[in-house]
Image (spheres, rainbow, N blue to C red):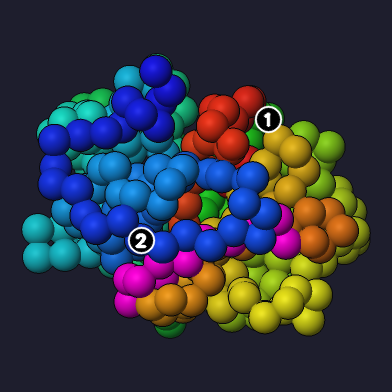
Amino acid sequence: MTRALLLAACLPLGAAPRAAAADPAVTHSFLAFGAETRLVDATGAVAWRYPAASRDGWALPDGGALLALSKSKEFPGGAAVEVNKDGKVVFEFKGTQAEVNTVQPLGDGKVLLTEAGPKPRLLEVNRDGKVLVEVPLQAQTKDHHLQTRMARKLANGNYLVPQLLDRVVREYTPEGKVAWEVKTPHMPFTAIRLPDGNTLIGCTLGHLVIEVDKDGKEVWRVTNDDLPGKPINDACGVQRLPNGNTVITSHHAGAKQVKLTEVTREKKVTWTYTDDRPAGIHHFQILETDGKPLAGPALR
């Protein structure tokens, strides 16, 4: 049984959304994060949901999920939680500032998260909620919501952090020093270090995605001008698939509008996802393509 099927839980199923595909042979199952947290199977049906809004998250091998939850009455500073396949919370870290916008499982029970607020920071915590690593982030503080998004720990031990209002992606050492940075043409939301050393960046309201090399030189770009129907509407979440294609969310897409778009290196659209829900998708994790689990680490 695949990890996508393992995520099916006892929570009520929703009505199946419509899914449109540029190529009917291409299918994907995915986790969606945003106003609604849900698993969508390859037919477009909702197979699992968690009853809280989320910012980021990951499918886990045991069928559970790690989630960054949006601020709420229960979590005024946001939270990082792990839920098992039955929807039960088995780990919780309550945010202490304005928002928790990132989570990443690190192995050995450790979790990476970011806190936005007057003292923006990146944390590694253990299962007891103890802070093991704290990295202060050099971000503006006038707008907490636009400080950081999808931070990720890299194989070299550093952290890649998109900083929206500052329009920069920075790589921080565990000591908080900036080891690498690149300015972006619009607010960066997602930054993904690729196996070849390049970095893929989703630029939110610029409605574009760029790829830069290790020197910060742009080597690839896709915008609405490249795509029929101009489907990109707030390019927040991005994922690079094993076949080299790139999937882009449109966070501001509404009902019956394209919410996910897959494009090739040559900027050909191979798959789109549309549903009837009024809210868009903040970020996502493609789990399977054409009925097969993705191979290797998820580049997102």
The quadrant of the picture occupied by the N terminus is: top left
The tag on residue 17 is 2
Q: Quadrant of residue 70?
A: bottom left
- What residue is at 37 percent from the left and 55 percent from the top? 33
Disc 2 marks a residue whose amino acid type is Pro
The residue that label 1 is drawn on is: 156
In the displayed structure, 252 sits above or below 291; it is: below
Mark 2 closeness class: few <14, some 14–19, many ≥20 residues within 10 Å: some
Whole-percent x and y of residue 91?
Answer: 20, 33
In the displayed structure, 22 sits above or below 290; it is: below
Residue farthest left in this picture: 74
Residue 12 horizontal side relative to residue 195, left or right:
left
Say whether disc 1 or disc 2 marks the residue closer to the N-terminus.
2
Whole-percent x and y of residue 13?
Answer: 19, 48
Residues shaded magenta: 269-280
In the displayed structure, 138 sits above or below 242; it is: below
Kindly tell me whether residue 228 is visible in this rendering: yes
Whole-percent x and y of residue 223?
Answer: 75, 74
Q: Nearer the viewer, residue 74 or 126?
A: 74
- What residue is at 23 percent from the left and 29 percent from the top? 85
* Mark 1 and mark 2: Cα distance apart in space: 41 Å
Residue 72 horizontal side relative to residue 226, left or right:
left
Residue 104 horizontal side relative to residue 69, left or right:
right
Kindly tell me whether residue 131 is visible in this rendering: no
